[in-house]
Amino acid sequence: MEYLSKQRYDEIAAELKHLIEDVYPKVKEDLSETGSQGDRSDNAGYREARRLQAKTISRIRFLQKILEHSRVIDPNVLPKDRVCLLSRVEFTNLTTNTRMTFEIVSPHEMNLEAGKISLKSPIGAALMGKKVGEIAEAQVPSGTMRLRIESITFN
């Protein structure tokens, strides 16, 4: 079971709808058109159309599985005093004395450029359940990071 924000759930549902209603019919039409152009074994357009069809079907199935096994999390029921899913956490790396801020999200929402880390990442997992002032230890490829929680907020 994965938990998603309402926004991400809606984005996945919209992408799935677009693939099913707009993209797949076009792919199917292209496949039919290229397939009618003679010998399929020598038809590069047909092979490319088949690859695109397989890729589209694969993406549709992947998104369907995400939605089937996901639930939208209600931010109102989350604890406000601990790091949890959808928390925006400001912390200090005690080794480098560097402050960082990240939002803790599900793996399907992770986007480092947007400041979102997965709760399953080493840092995300180490921060989960901690309170302001506590120190978390994250096992990362370069060793152990010691992180002091400075603040916890919610969007």
Image (tube, grey):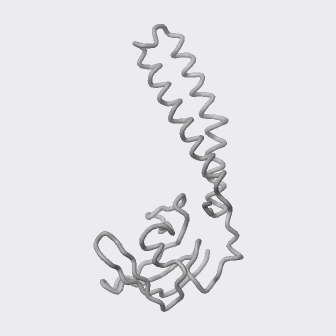
Q: For the point 66% across and 42% down, which residue is it?
A: 17
Q: Quadrant location of the N terminus?
A: bottom right
Q: Residue furthest bottom?
A: 133
Question: x, y (%) of residue 25?
Answer: 63, 28
Q: For the point 65% across and 52% down, which residue is it?
A: 67
Against 112, residue 43 (above or below) is above
Against 147, residue 15 (above or below) is above
Q: For the point 55% across and 41% down, which residue is it?
A: 59
Q: Residue furthest front?
A: 1
Question: x, y (%) of residue 3?
Answer: 62, 63
Q: For the point 55% across and 81% down, which residue is it?
A: 129
Count how many numbered circles sit on residues in the image: 0
Question: x, y (%) of residue 39?
Answer: 45, 8
Question: x, y (%) of residue 118?
Answer: 49, 66
Q: Quadrant location of the C terminus?
A: bottom right
Q: Residue furthest left?
A: 142
Left or right relative to 5: residue 131? left
Name the image quarter holding residue 143. bottom left
Left or right relative to 41: residue 154? right
